[in-house]
Image: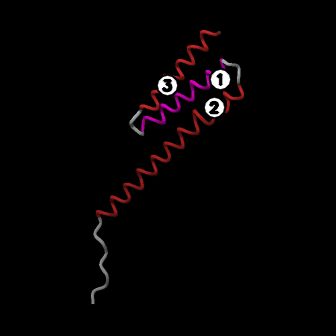
Amino acid sequence: MILIQLMLLLLVAISGTAVVFARDPSTQPVGIGFFGLILTVMFMAFRAPDVALSQIVIGTVGLPLMILLALAKMRRDAQQRETAEKRPAKEGPAR
């Protein structure tokens, strides 16, 4: 059991480092979700099932979903700004 726990701790350290060094915003939520899944397995190995259930909901599903939704909204707003800048400004009524 100790060997499994040590291996899981090593996986947590590696995946956490990978999330920190991920530069592409679209790959970061996937890395965070994977990190949350490894943490869930680690909590189960350390016999903390209540914490593992919370980690599944928050760390594996909730946080990556919020990040993906925020990225989608930022991209949509940027596209709307670009299209607004390309359109010519409406001129006032001719006198």
Look at the magenta stretch and give its main secondary structure.
Answer: helix
Instruction: State which mark lies toward you, 2 or 3.
Output: 3
Q: Amino acid at mark 3?
A: Ser
54 vs 85, left or right, is right
Q: Residue at position x 50%, y 27% from top?
A: 16
- Residue at mark 2: 55
The disc, 1 or 3, on the residue closer to the chain's N-terminal end is 3
Crowding at label 1, few (<14), some or many (≥20) Cα neighbours within 10 Å?
A: some
**Within the magenta stretch, is there residue 32?**
yes
- Residue at mark 1: 43
Q: Secondary structure at mark 2?
A: helix
Give x and y (percent) for residue 86: 28, 63
Q: Quadrant of the N terminus?
A: top right
Q: Secondary structure at mark 1?
A: helix
Q: Secondary structure at mark 3?
A: helix
Q: Residue at position x 33%, y 58% from top?
A: 82
86 vs 73, left or right, is left
Give x and y (percent) for residue 27: 43, 35
Give x and y (percent) for residue 2: 63, 10
Q: Amino acid at mark 1?
A: Phe
- Residue at mark 3: 15
The CA span between labels 2 and 1 is 9 Å
Bounds of the magenta segment: 26-45
Give x and y (percent) for residue 95: 27, 90
Q: Amino acid at mark 2?
A: Gln
Colouring chosen for the image of the structure:
secondary structure
86 vs 2, left or right, is left
Relative vertical location of residue 44 with respect to residue 86 in this rendering, above or below: above
The disc, 2 or 1, on the residue closer to the chain's N-terminal end is 1
Dots 2, 1 in contact, CB < 8 A: yes
